[in-house]
Amino acid sequence: MDVNDFRIAVTLSGLVLFLALVAYTWSRRRRAAHDEAALLPFIGESLPAEPAVNASRGDTP
């Protein structure tokens, strides 16, 4: 076995793994997960942030 045969095997296995990853990512079963992930930037906290406590004036929340 020549070193070039090893290089060919590694290249082909990398190609096969890449194509498998693309097929898994774009499969219809993953659509719900992609739709949910697409909305993540738009989900915010519904409650306003609590005001900071000013210890020098003795404020309490």
Image (cartoon, rainbow, N blue to C red):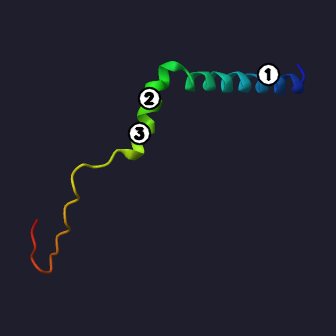
Q: Is mark 1 on a helix, strand or loop?
A: helix
Cα separation, mark 1 vs mark 3, equals 41 Å
- From the viewer's perspective, is 18 left or right of 61? right
Instruction: First in sequence, mark 1 or 2: give its number.
Output: 1
Query: Relative to 42, does residue 50 appear above or below in the rendering?
Result: below
Looking at the rendering, in which quadrant would you find the N terminus?
top right
Q: Name the residue under label 3.
A: 39
**Residue 33 got which mark?**
2
Residue of label 1: 9
Is label 1 or label 3 in front?
3
Q: Which of 50 and 15 is in front in this view?
A: 50
Q: Are marks 3 and 2 in contact (CB under 8 Å)?
A: no
Q: Which amino acid does label 3 sit on?
A: Leu
Disc 2 is placed on an element classified as: helix
Q: Is residue 15 left or right of residue 43?
A: right
Residue 15: where, in percent of width, then height?
A: 73, 25
Q: In which quarter of the image is the C terminus?
A: bottom left
> Label 3: how many residues lie within 10 Å, few (<14), some (14-19) or many (20+)?
few
Crowdedness of circle 1 by 10 Å Cα count: few (<14), some, many (20+)? few
